[in-house]
Image (cartoon, rainbow, N blue to C red):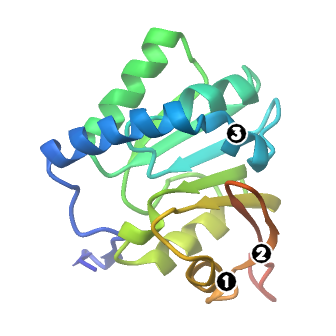
Amino acid sequence: MIKKSGEEFAMATPMPNVAFSGMSLIFKVRDLVSPPRKSLEEAGLVLGDRVLDYGCGPGGYVTDAAEMVGESGKVYALDIHPLAIERVRSIAAKKGLSNVETIRSDCRTGLPDGSLDVVLLYDIFHMLDNSQAVLAEMHRVLKPDGLLSFSDHHMHEDDIVAGVTGDRLFTLVEKGEKTYTFVPRRIRGGS
């Protein structure tokens, strides 16, 4: 973890551009074999939802998420890598997705407390240097009845559940075919 001006960062630095491009190619193949919409359906996205795709990478979930939440909803695509932000902006422009907004960050979203219905935390958790700071931020921005939809094929189920519930910010409520669904726990005297 790097500290800079008193802030904690979840990842030390973005991956090199060539690694990001390679990862993007792998994700395209993954998305052909396992369409993103299936995970988003498990996440329960509906019209009007406000969604954060944390660690959005090349934007594999953005189009389907934007279509599922519709014009009355919003998809925030957050990533530390500048190429990820470029790709998501390009996807949104080409497909006319006016309900997609990018955020370049590795932890802090800049979104108001309790403003999101769903956070997507897909295939990024294993890469975080400070996963607890990220979970604290996700807890902060989720509505009390919001959902954290989690998937990371690099991790075993026990590690996923322990990693997400360890600080007692989230409770596991469902294990689906592709995702785990957690809900925020309300902390006495806090959010």
* Residue occupying image coordinates x 60% and y 34%: 35
Q: Is residue 125 left or right of residue 53?
A: left
Residue 187 visible in the displayed image:
yes
* Residue occupying image coordinates x 62% and y 77%: 157
Q: Is residue 77 left or right of residue 17?
A: right
Q: Position of residue 127 (x, y in %)?
A: 36, 68
Which of 91/160 is in front?
A: 160
In the image, which is nearer the foreground, mark 1 or mark 3? 3
Q: Position of residue 167 (x, y in %)?
A: 62, 89
Residue 116 visible in the displayed image:
no
Earlier along the polypeptide chain: callout 1 or callout 3? 3
Earlier along the polypeptide chain: callout 2 or callout 1? 1
Residue topped by disc 1: 165
Quarter the N terminus occupies: bottom left
Which of 37/183 is in front?
A: 37
Quarter the C terminus occupies: bottom right
Instruction: Specify the amino acid type for callout 3.
Output: Lys
* Real-space Cα separation, disc 2 to disc 3, in angstroms: 20 Å
Residue topped by disc 3: 38
Which of 131/4 is in front?
A: 131
- Is the C-beta separation of discs 2 and 1 under 8 Å? yes
- Point out which mark residue 172 bears: 2
Q: Position of residue 180 (x, y in %)?
A: 71, 64
